Image (cartoon, rainbow, N blue to C red):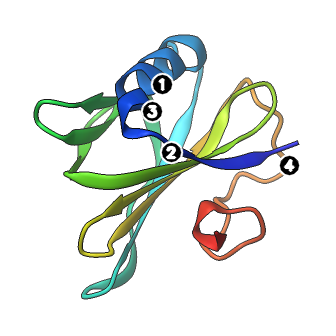
Amino acid sequence: MSSTKQLPRAEWKDYFDRFTREFLSEDRADDATIEVMSPTLGDQFEVSSARLLGIDYDPKAETFEILFEDLDHLVFEPTEIWILEDEPGFVSTIEVVQADGTKQIIYLRSSGAATDDSSPRPAGGPGAPADR
């Protein structure tokens, strides 16, 4: 069963370091799609089905980083991070909220996780962090 929860800021670094170590590796074909929902720019996809290498938070620079095979996606000064965690601990969706109301939603697909559809969940779909 999936569960949505807000991660306390003090846990961001360790949580995503552990997630990267446990669920992302070179021998898996994990990918991610990033949807940005901005009050000023609207809803748009920044990255679609790119090979995911890692996720990191740098507390000194206050930067959340998603590392892909050919690029990095940075979110500066996030105020909240919400996750949708599936069994057995794989995060299928991450919502990063910024002070201006912009939400960056990262949909993760794992070669090791059972999925019935290769397309991302819609931002307003049942169980997505945006529904809270």
Q: Which residue is mark 1?
A: 15
Mark 4 or mark 2, earlier in chain? 2
Instruction: Tell me the tag on residue 2.
Output: none
Instruction: Kindly identify the amino acid type of the residue bearing the numbered disc 2.
Output: Ala
Question: Label 2's element?
Answer: strand
Counting from the top left corner in percent of width and height, residue 63 is at 20, 41
Question: Label 3's element?
Answer: strand
Q: Give the residue drawn at x 33%, y 29%.
A: 56
Q: Which residue is mark 2?
A: 32
Instruction: Tell me the tag on residue 116.
Output: 4
Mark 3 or mark 2, earlier in chain? 2
Question: Label 4's element?
Answer: loop
Instruction: Tell me the tag on residue 52.
Output: 3
Mark 4 vs mark 1: in front: 1
Counting from the top left corner in percent of width and height, residue 64 is at 28, 41
Question: Label 1's element?
Answer: helix
Instruction: Kindly identify the amino acid type of the residue bearing the numbered disc 3.
Output: Leu
Mark 2 to mark 1: distance in Å?
18 Å
Q: Quadrant of residue 85?
A: top right
Mark 4 to mark 2: distance in Å?
16 Å
Q: Determine whether, in the image, residue 9 is placed left or right of residue 28.
A: left
Q: Bin the neighbour count of mark 4 within 10 Å (Cα to Cα): few under 14, some 14-19, many 20 and up.
A: few
Instruction: Kindly identify the amino acid type of the residue bearing the numbered disc 4.
Output: Asp
Counting from the top left corner in percent of width and height, residue 31 is at 53, 38
Mark 1 or mark 3, earlier in chain? 1
Q: Give the residue drawn at x 63%, y 48%.
A: 5
Q: Quadrant of residue 102?
A: bottom left
